[in-house]
Amino acid sequence: SDYNQLGFNLRSNIFQGGPLETRSLMKDSYTPDIIQKAVRDPKTWHGRRTDELGKWHQKNALNLNLQKALEDKYG
């Protein structure tokens, strides 16, 4: 039956899992100096700029964390 065949395949290690070494298409396509020269702008994420609402949410999260830390420290 299928159950016995699956058990045999698992015992004989036919399903060995993924490769031990991963490969990257970008690393295979470009030389190392091009990858090192690549400038990563933190304001740009996949071609989209962080808008004002996103900046406000970042500042609000920092403010909430600061308020929580102050309350924990000073009560």
Image: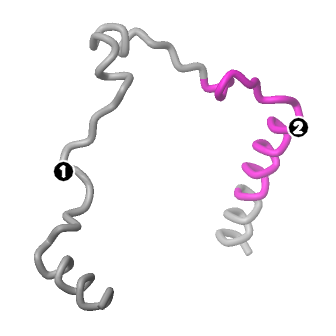
Quarter of the figure with residue 64: bottom right
Q: 68 above or below 49?
A: below
Upstream in the sequence, badge 2 or badge 1? Answer: 1
Q: Residue at x 36, y 26 (%)?
A: 25
Q: Residue at x 23, y 67 (%)?
A: 15
The secondary element bearing badge 1 is classed as loop
Closer-to-camera residue (7/75): 7
Query: Where is residue 39 shown, x and y percent of the image?
Result: 50, 13
Read off the residue under disc 1: 20
The verdict on residue 63 being magenta is: yes
Read off the residue under disc 2: 53
The secondary element bearing badge 2 is classed as helix
Quarter of the figure with residue 2: bottom left
For badge 1, the amino acid type reads Leu
Res. 41 mark: none
On the rendered image, what quadrant is the N terminus found in?
bottom left
Q: Residue at x 17, y 68 (%)?
A: 14
The verdict on residue 47 being magenta is: yes
Query: Where is residue 48 shown, x and y percent of the image?
Result: 74, 25
Q: 45 above or below 1?
A: above
Q: Which residues are magenta?
A: 42-65
Q: Are marks 2 and 1 in contact (CB under 8 Å)?
A: no
Q: Residue at x 74, y 75 (%)?
A: 75
Say left or right for 21 vs 36. left
